[in-house]
Amino acid sequence: MRKLVLPELYRALFVVAGPSLLAGCAPNVPMSAKSSSDSLEAGVLAFAQASFGQKIGTGQCAELADHALTANGANTFSTYAAGTNGDDYIWGTRVALQDARPGDVIQFRDYSVTVTASTGTDETSTDREWVHHTAVVEQNVGIALLILEQNVDASQTVKRGRVAIKPTIEFDGRVTTSTSIEGQLTAYRPTAG
């Protein structure tokens, strides 16, 4: 059995399951849920999106969030005196993962996602693991976050990614797709510096 890498698996699942794969995955935050941090989040997101394909700072994952927050006058992990000696970074006010919005910062710790697709006669699974990683939320689709990140896949440029935030099992009549999750994923809302 051939093991697919994550982007191949998502493409294969989309081809097999069709657009219904993400059906019902509307953004998790209604537009009416505005707060004073909206402009900070919008600025952080705009910085991260404008950085797509570029290397920010030295290319380390945390530098994308750090530069985006700094450029928008927000506090960074250094404000909270965390992140030294392998500690997790703190990027602002902690929010529930399901409430993460575009422009929020995500901190990964020993986080892994396994996606398995089975037709009953053939099964394919793939794993992705983030030991200590930082990313910026581009969109919350309910079961997953679409993110902007760097220092992944042997590249230090900003890329788009997807990370599951809820375990799921789906069946479309032909393929059963399951997602399992382990580890810690923490969402932070930017705060003004």
Image: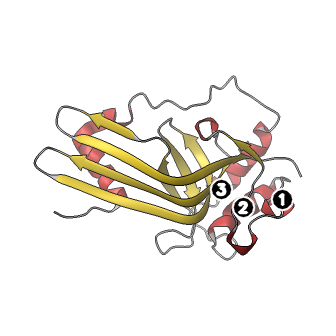
- C-alpha gap between disc 2 and disc 1: 8 Å
Q: Position of residue 135 (x, y in %)?
A: 61, 57
Residue 28: name its quadrant.
top right
Tell me what residue is drawn at x 82 percent, y 47 percent. Answer: 191
For marks 1 and 3, the one nearer the N-term is 3
Residue 186 x %, y %: 63, 50
In front here: 92 or 131?
131
Q: Residues within 10 Å of mark 3 (few under 14, many from 20)?
A: many
Left or right? Give the position of 177 relative to 22: left
Q: Position of residue 72 (x, y in %)?
A: 81, 53
Residue 48: which disc? 3
Q: Where, quadrant-wise, is the N terminus in this rendering? A: bottom left
Residue at image mark 2: 89
Q: Helix, strand or loop at disc 3?
A: helix
Q: Which mark is residue 80?
A: 1
Can you tell which of label 1 and label 3 is closer to the viewer?
1
Instruction: Give the mark nearest the N terminus, 2 or 1.
Output: 1
Report the amino acid beneath label 3: Ala
Q: Are circles 2 and 1 on residues that touch, CB within 8 Å?
A: yes
Asked if labels 3 and 2 touch by Cβ distance under 8 angstroms, the answer is no
Question: SS class of the residue under badge 1?
Answer: helix
